Amino acid sequence: MMQIQLDTILHMLNEIQPLGIWSEDTPLFESGYMDSMMIFDKLLPALEERFEIQIAPFELIPEHFDTPSAIFAYVKGKKER
């Protein structure tokens, strides 16, 4: 089972959007680094593949994807179920 670390999430975000300056509290949308197309086309598939999870449509709420630390908490919670 893969260990989930915040650094892994930050690295993924940097791969998807190298122009972003990512920290644990960087807002994905408000920063202008990501838009909904990047989230759906790149981030969600990368998270599902990397962490072997399925992201259900009802889970696509701002609280889960607002910042890298929110993504980390969401993925960690999914893996602990």
Image (tube, grey):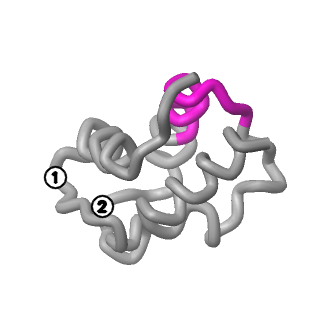
Q: Position of residue 56 (x, y in %)?
A: 79, 43
Predominant secondary structure in magenta? Answer: helix
Q: Position of residue 49 (x, y in %)?
A: 55, 23
Q: Is residue 80 above or below residue 24?
A: above
Residue placed under numbered mark 1 in the picture: 19
Answer few, some or many: residues within 10 Å of disc 1's Cα (few below 14, many 20 plus, some between 14 and 19): few
Q: Is residue 48 above or below residue 35?
A: above
Disc 2 residue type? Tyr
Residue 53, quarter of picture: top right
Disc 1 residue type? Leu
Disc 1 secondary structure class: loop
Residue drawn at point x = 24 percent, y = 60 percent: 22
Q: Is residue 24 left or right of residue 45?
A: left
Give the magenta part as a residue range.
Answer: 44-54
Q: Earlier in the sequence, mark 2 or mark 1?
A: 1
Residue placed under numbered mark 2 in the picture: 33
The front one of 63 and 24 is 24
Quarter of the image with the C terminus in it: top right
Residue drawn at point x = 39 percent, y = 72 percent: 27
In whole angstroms, how far apart are the C-alphas of marks 2 and 1?
7 Å
Q: Is residue 77 left or right of residue 23?
A: right
Please tell me the numbered disc located at residue 29: none
Disc 2 secondary structure class: loop
Answer few, some or many: residues within 10 Å of disc 2's Cα (few below 14, many 20 plus, some between 14 and 19): some
The front one of 29 and 37 is 29
| In the image, farthest residue toward the bottom | 30
Residue drawn at point x = 43 percent, y = 69 percent: 29
